[in-house]
Image: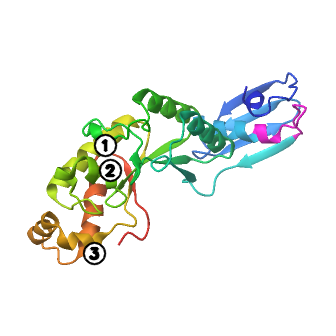
Amino acid sequence: QYIRKYKPNARLSKAEGKVIYDNTLEAEEYRITVSDSVTIYASGNISLNHAFASLVQLTDSNGALKKCEISDKPDFPYRSFMVDVGRQTHPIKYILDYLDLCWLYKLSCIQLHLSDDPGVAVPIKSFPNLATEGRAYTPDEIRQINLYAKERGISIVPELEVPGHAEQFMKKYPEIFGSLNIVSACDEVFEALYKIYDDIIELFPYSKYIHIGGDEASIGEWQSCERTQRYMKANNISSIDEMYAEFVRKVTDYILSKGKTPIVWEGFG
């Protein structure tokens, strides 16, 4: 069925094959032997998906496989690319097609950049006005994306961008997040972000990574933010750079407490 999907014109011949699960193999490692039949040795669902993808790539236009032996495993566990759904609408069909490409080329993750200044492409239960009308995926669509990815051994990496690139936060809830070009750094904002990340974790239950953004933030504007200045004074933070590191630490510590691995853009401080 995989070969029919990716090479629909191939005339497949009936061939025997079997899958052998081998717990001595690493998490994404697999082996393939193609002779008169096909034998796949896999450690689990993810490596089995990799093996099927290799068979698709090996199949010629006539549906035939040459005799071969393959032993393969990735050099790096995190292999990903990003789709920016915060700035531009991507119909769900596009996301599923991207997941197919991830499967075919054995990428481990797909990062969904869910929020940016132009919009928020995901429903947030605790702050329902954040989602951009007409552009946000429905909970049913998100469930479909999650299951489609899981079946193919791919992890979704949801990204909610803060404290910069967060115009929608200030526009929809200025009484909480402030009205500068960066969300305020204070206990009230941290508590709100914790609720939002709880919603993200609930929406993406199979995701082991949560991306918090962290890049290109106008941290100089915190100099004129009264709530940020009060937080800095109360916590003996002497510089804006230290405050930015504190912001990232607070959010990452919370995500770690939820059993998830936080990711942040490099060069944030």
**Residue 71, above or below 42:** below
Label 1: which residue? 130
- Tell me if label 2 and label 1 are in contact, CB under 8 Å: yes
Which residue: 68% across, 31% down? 20
Residue furthest to the bottom: 238
Given residues 7 and 135, the one toward you in this image is: 135
Give the alpha-carbon distance from disc 3 to disc 2, as whole Å.
24 Å
**How dense is the environment of label 3, judged by Cα within 10 Å: few (below 14), some, or many (20 and up)?**
some
> Predominant secondary structure in magenta?
loop
Given residues 14 and 95, the one toward you in this image is: 95
**How dense is the environment of label 2, judged by Cα within 10 Å: few (below 14), some, or many (20 and up)?**
many
Give the alpha-carbon distance from disc 1 to disc 3, as whole Å.
28 Å
Is residue 22 in view from this perspective?
Answer: no
Number of marks drawn = 3
Label 2: which residue? 168
As helix, strand or loop, the secondary structure at mark 3 comes to: helix
Q: Decide if residue 191 is on the left or right side of residue 267.
A: left
Residue 156 position within the rendered picture, expressed as x and y whole percent measured from the top left:
49, 43
Residue 11 position within the rendered picture, expressed as x and y whole percent measured from the top left:
88, 26
**Residue 152, above or below 257:** above
As helix, strand or loop, the secondary structure at mark 1 comes to: helix
Which residue: 21% across, 52% down? 174
Q: Amino acid at mark 3?
A: Asp
Q: What stretch of residues is rendered in magenta?
A: 55-67
Q: Quadrant of residue 9?
A: top right
Label 3: which residue? 241
Q: Earlier in the sequence, mark 3 or mark 2?
A: 2
